[in-house]
Image: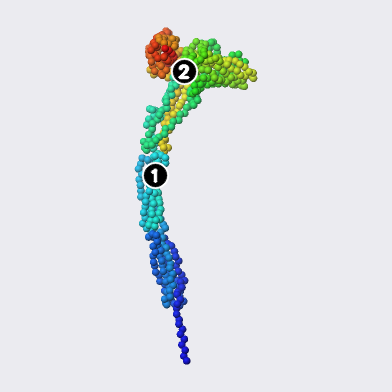
Amino acid sequence: TTAQQTITVDDSTAPEFTFVPADYTVECSDDVTFDDAEAVDNCGEVTISYALDTLGLSCPNNFQILRTIVATDDCNNSETVVQTITVEDTTAPEFVSVPADYSIECTEEPTYGDVEVMDNCSDWEVVLTTDTIESGCDNVYDIVLTWTATDACDNESSASQTISVIDTSLPQITFSCGLENGEIVDVCCEDLSGSITVPAACELEAVDFACGGDLTISLTETYEGEYTPSETVDHWCVISEPQGMDEGLTCEGLTPHAMRLFNFPGDDFYSLIDGAVSHNVDGTMTYYMTLVSQSNPDAGWELEAQFTQPLDWFEWQNQPGNHSFKNDCGLGDHMEWEYSIMTSGEAQGWGEYEGSDMTLMHQPVSGYFGFQMGEGANNKNGNYGFSGWFYCSGTFDGAPFNTSGDIFGELECCLPWTLDRAYTVADCSGNTTTFHYEVHATGAPCINEEEGGLQDGEDQTMVSYKDLIKVLDLMPNPTTGMTQVTLFTEELGTTAQVSLFNMAGQEVMPLFNGQLNAGWPMPLMFDASDLEAGMYQLRIHSKNFVTSKKLLVAH
């Protein structure tokens, strides 16, 4: 018999991939690479085919490539895989060129440049914004330019430029009261008491011509010198011992001295080593004296005393109670003097007096006599000075004592010092211009310009009336009508100008302008009946000389 066996051989197994390219992501500016897949089949050859599809995403440069890979054997068995390649744009545009930062003066106009931009994959758009950053000064600020570049996939980058507007120009002074920078202004001494007129500080004017804006002008005043005014002291005087007159003695025939103590257990007479007076801004006075015994050069006192604000004769007289003056020498005019009261005082011993002390108080307690200052007021000579009587108590050589005494002195109140006025003109930016000038108190007397000033070879000195022209009388004083002033000089060829001034310094009545007869009293009569009631000043001028008398008109 015959039998038939049918053996069917078929191929139903698809190829198997042994390598499939992995999914990956690539920047749009980079190349896309396609790697080959690999596959095997159990029975025959394998054919691999590829198909590409593109899937768009959020922007033109963002997309996916879907790569379909099919492995097919000879019997059309196949296996399919998909490789995903993602192409994206994550790179922002790049600024190739940006204008550099720079500074300009506030008077200049800014200039603006352009930027250059590139992108790896697409076109871009550039937007410019401008901001101004203030500094607090109108003329100083920053202009900040910011460029923002955006590509098709909204990737963006920015760059900026800062233009700094600055002000380096200096303020210009337009008005300085006619003064030059560094100029010296001399001021003279107007009277023996040291009165001077310090000119008011110049009110500078300045402008910022370059950029405008507000300016600040500050003034710093600095005093220089040994006897300068201060916040507490208006002016100083230097004390010297009263000079002798005939034969070197004082008017009462004593050896010149600056302090005398009566019935003191130590020495009675003391000379002056050094001394000064501070005329304080509150009107009071402080006297400082270093005294040495005339019989023992190794013993003495350091004295300091406080006094009330000086009063003129009429103010002194118009106080409650009785008040008078002491004129032991008969020199000077007590109506021209000033009067004060000692409010406190003390003295400390030095040298062999060390450990001794005394407390001073005004004498007499009633204030009948005052501490007096003026020409002849020192009761030793006719010079400008002071004298005062005091009561004192303390300890000397370990024992208590009580006594009284006097102090005397001549005063030099026309002392030199310098006032430096330094100005700083500043704008808001801190630019500054400086200016300064100095006021010099020369210590020299004021010269009457109307009399022609000094002649060649003359010294500039202040001459008191007792040296050139004496006022023998001014009577009646107070007056209501006809009044007589009598002048006297011993100098040949002396001319004088005599006028009556009110206390505001205005001339109200010229009395005389001519030459005086040397050696002969010259009476001048004038009628005060038409003058308003009040205080007036009779002023006598001559070359390098001035003196005055006060006249009270009462109706």
Q: Position of residue 140 (x, y in %)?
A: 40, 41
Q: Residue furthest right?
A: 398
* Amino acid type shown at disc 2: Leu
The quarter of the displayed image where residue 173 is located: top left
Q: Secondary structure at mark 1?
A: strand
User: Would you say the residues marked 1 and 2 are in contact, meaning their CB atoms lie under 8 Å apart?
Assistant: no
The kind of residue on which mark 1 rests is: Thr
Q: Is residue 373 above or below residue 72?
A: above
* Mark 1, other Cα within 10 Å: few <14 / some 14–19 / many ≥20: few
Is residue 456 at least partly visible in the picture? no
Tell me if I can see residue 514 in this picture. Answer: yes
Instruction: Bin the neighbour count of mark 2 within 10 Å (Cα to Cα): few under 14, some 14-19, many 20 and up.
Output: many
- Residue at screen point 39% across, 57% down: 153
User: In which quadrant is the C terminus drawn?
Assistant: top left
At horizontal 39% and vertical 44% (from top left) the residue drawn is 132
Q: Residue at x 45, y 27 (%)?
A: 419
Q: Residue at x 45, y 23 (%)?
A: 441
Task: Report the residue marked by disc 2.
Answer: 192
